[in-house]
Image (tube, rainbow, N blue to C red):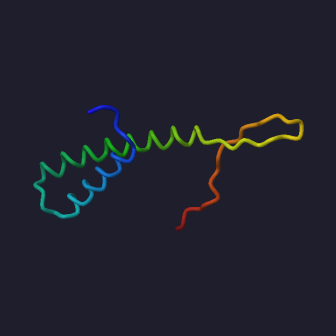
Amino acid sequence: MGEKKFEEAMERLEQIVESLESGNLSLEESLKIFEEGMSLVNFCSKKLEEAEQKVTILIKESEGKYSQQPFESDEKEES
């Protein structure tokens, strides 16, 4: 398989979670897909970090210059 895409990895993660939640797998099968899931989580986290680094807001300053500021979400995590 070529380079994985984020969306494909997330879809596979959803399948893995469903399989693990079903309780129909043997211990060996559960461990195997859990390991796959952890690998996918790491892949997705890396992709999200890369995307976050690329996201910037351009602000035009009074002199006509542009400056870059990191994107910061206004959303706050709910407790």
Of residue 76 and residue 60, the one placed in the foreground of this image is 60
Q: Is residue 19 above or below residue 56?
A: below
Question: Based on the displayed image, in which of its 4 quarters is residue 26 positioned?
Answer: bottom left
**Residue 73 left/right relative to 44:** right
Image point 59% across, 62% down: which residue? 76
**Residue 19 left/right relative to 70:** left
Question: Based on the displayed image, in which of its 4 quarters is residue 47 positioned?
Answer: top left
Image point 56% across, 43% down: which residue? 52
- The image shows residue 31 at horizontal and vertical percentages of 19, 48
Q: Is residue 10 above or below residue 39?
A: below
- The image shows residue 53 at horizontal and vertical percentages of 58, 38
Extreme residue in the front direction: 64
Q: Quadrant of the N terminus?
A: top left
Of residue 7 and residue 35, the one placed in the foreground of this image is 7
Extreme residue in the right direction: 63
Extreme residue in the left direction: 26
Image point 62% across, 54% down: which residue? 73
- The image shows residue 37 at horizontal and vertical percentages of 29, 47
Extreme residue in the top direction: 2
Image point 21% across, 48% down: which residue? 33
**Residue 68 left/right relative to 13:** right
